[in-house]
Image (spheres, rainbow, N blue to C red):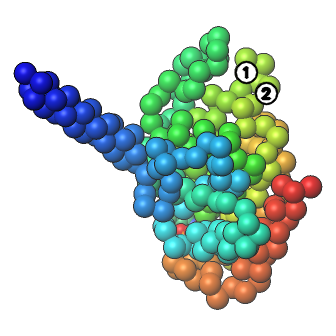
Amino acid sequence: MEITRRKFIKQSSITIIGLGLIGSVFIDASCSDKEKKVSEYDHKNPPSIIVLVGSSRAEGNTDLLVNKMIVIIEKNDLSVEKIYLKDKKILPCKLCNKCREIGRPQCIQDDDFNRIIKKIQLAEAIIMSSPVYWRSVSGVMKLFMERCYSQFDKDWKNSKIKGKHASLVVVSGDNNTEKQCAPIIESFTGFLNWNEISISGSVTASAVEKGEIINNAEALKNAEDEAVKLIDAIRR
Ligand SMILES: Cc1cc2nc3c(=O)[nH]c(=O)nc-3n(C[C@H](O)[C@H](O)[C@H](O)COP(=O)(O)O)c2cc1C
C-alpha cells in the first residue's frame, strides 16, 4: 500500500512538473533566442534600456545603427534588451476602451504587446528605431505605437510609461535624409510627447542595400554619440 502511495506521489510530481514545462514553453513561444524569456525575466533587475527594432531586416541598416548604440550602452554597464517587432504578434488597437475601465487592466488583446510594454514599464529608457516606409514609420512600429493607447488614463494623462528617456534611430533609402526622415521623427516625437517621455536625441542616415550603413562612418559615430547622450540622460 505504502509503495503504491509513493509511486502515486512520484507519478503526480512528474505530471505537475511536465505541465509546468508545457506552460512555460507556451508563454515564451514568441521569444527569439536573443531575447529574455518571460519566465527568465528578473523583475528585481530588469534591463535599463529596451530597444525596439522596427525594421523588417535583422542586420539591416536600422539594426546595425542600433547595435552601435548597444555596444556603448553595455560598455557603460547598463543592461539592454533588443526586441525585433517583426517577430512579434501585435494586433491593431480596437478602441474597445476596456483598458480605461476601473483598475486599468492591460490591453485585453492577449498578444505580444502586453509582454513588451511590461518590459518598457520596468525600464529607464527606450530606443525606437524604424526605416522610412513610404514617408512613415514601419507597419510593425505603428502597431506597437497604436497599442500604447492602453497606457493612458481616461483624461489622456499619466501614461504608465511616462518619465522615461528615449533615443530615435531612422534610416531612409533616399539620400535626401532629413526630408525623408522628418515625418518619422515627427511621428515618434508626437507619440513620446503624449507619453511624457523625454527625447535625448536622434540619429538619421541613408542607405539602401542591407548592411550598407556599415560604410557610413559619420552615421555610426552619430549612433555612438547618441548612446552617450541617452546614458547621460538616464544618469542625470
Ligand atoms: C515598403 C518600403 C517603403 C519604403 N519607402 C521609402 C520612402 O518613402 N523613402 C525612403 O527614403 N526610403 C524608403 N524605403 C527604403 C528603406 O527606408 C531603406 O532601404 C532602408 O535602408 C531600409 O532599412 P533596413 O536596412 O533597416 O531594412 C522603403 C523601403 C520599403 C521596403
Regarding mark 2 in the picture, which secondary structure is present there? loop
**The N terminus - image quarter:** top left
Which residue does the image show at 73% across and 73% down from the upper left?
75
Is the Cβ of the residue at disc 1 closer than 8 Å to that at disc 2? yes
Q: Residue at x 43, y 52 (%)?
A: 31
In the rendered image, residue 154, in percent from the top left (x then y), is placed at 73, 17
Vertical comparison of 232 with 8: above or below: below
Task: Specify few, some or many for label 2: CA neighbours under 10 Å numbering under 14, 14-19, or 20 or more.
Answer: some
In the image, ligand 1 is in what quadrant? Answer: bottom right
Residue 149 drawn at (x, y percent): 65, 30
* Residue underneath mark 2: 158
Q: Is residue 138 above or below residue 224?
A: above
Amino acid type of the residue tagged 2 in the rendering: Asn
Q: Nearer the viewer, residue 184 or 228?
A: 228
Question: In the rendered view, does 188 fall on the left or right side of 59?
Answer: right
The mark nearer the N terminus, 1 or 2, is 1
**How many angstroms separate mark 1 from mark 2 (CA)?**
6 Å
- Viewer-closest of 85 and 176: 85
Q: Position of residue 14 (x, y in %)?
A: 22, 37
User: On the rendered image, what quadrant is the C terminus found in?
Assistant: bottom right
Q: Which residue is mark 1?
A: 153
